Amino acid sequence: MASTTPLLLIGLYVVATAAAAQVPSGIDTRKVGEQEIVSIIKLPGSRAAVFDAMTQCTHLLQWMQPAPMKMVACSTTPRAGGTLTYVFEAPQGRRLEVRGRYEKVESPHTIRYRESYDFSPLQFDVQGAFEEAGGATIFTQTLHYRSREERDTDFPNVAGSQPGVYANLAKYLARPTVTK
């Protein structure tokens, strides 16, 4: 998988690829190289609508609900040097916080940030690219880990959570009230 322009998503390191336009639907998530996970996700809507849905709290609070968790607080400043904070609540009431610092934001094309957690020492770089393709948007996300071991340990979590989360995003983007 040859990479080109980098971009972002919640804790995912994204890179646009020529192969992205060939993803018929859904998600293709793979280990790439020694330290990366690359996901290619086809989503309904324009690149601008998808970018906004992935970077603005008014949208994130509507769809970023990784089962069985619920996002209960969100703060984003999508610009270089800005921060992001997502607070999720588990059914038992335990709260988990995801944090990031944006390194690059070029709306609606590219986003890059470093992600960390209050409940884990895991840190990784998230890069995302948004490409329009036939009325849809191909979001390519690349997560770059500090080691192969960290990548391999986190892969089941990434591959297991993405289908539900991105299905939520696709449903959200398909709503007539969401700007296309």
Image (cartoon, rainbow, N blue to C red):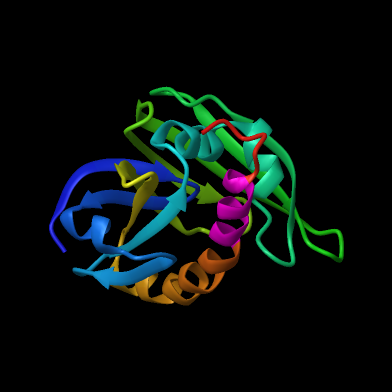
- Percent x, y for residue 153? 43, 75
Q: Main secondary structure of the magenta part?
A: helix
User: Which residue lies at the image location 65% right of the left edge and 61% below the top edge?
Assistant: 66
Q: Furthest-left residue in view?
A: 2
User: Which residue lies at the image location 53% right of the left edge and 24% below the top edge?
Assistant: 77
User: Which residue lies at the image location 62% right of the left edge and 35% below the top edge?
Assistant: 178
**52 lies above or below 5:** above
User: Which residue lies at the image location 25% right of the left edge and 55% below the top edge?
Assistant: 21
Q: Quadrant of the N terminus?
A: bottom left
Q: Furthest-right residue in view?
A: 92
Quarter-of-image position of residue 30: bottom left
Residue 62 inside the magenta-drawn segment? no
- Percent x, y for residue 140? 33, 52
Is 132 in front, or is 111? 132
Is 3 in front, or is 176? 176
- Percent x, y for residue 106? 33, 26
**120 lies above or below 30:** above
Part of the protein shown in magenta:
165-174
163 horizontally vs 142: left or right: right
Quarter-of-image position of residue 165: bottom right
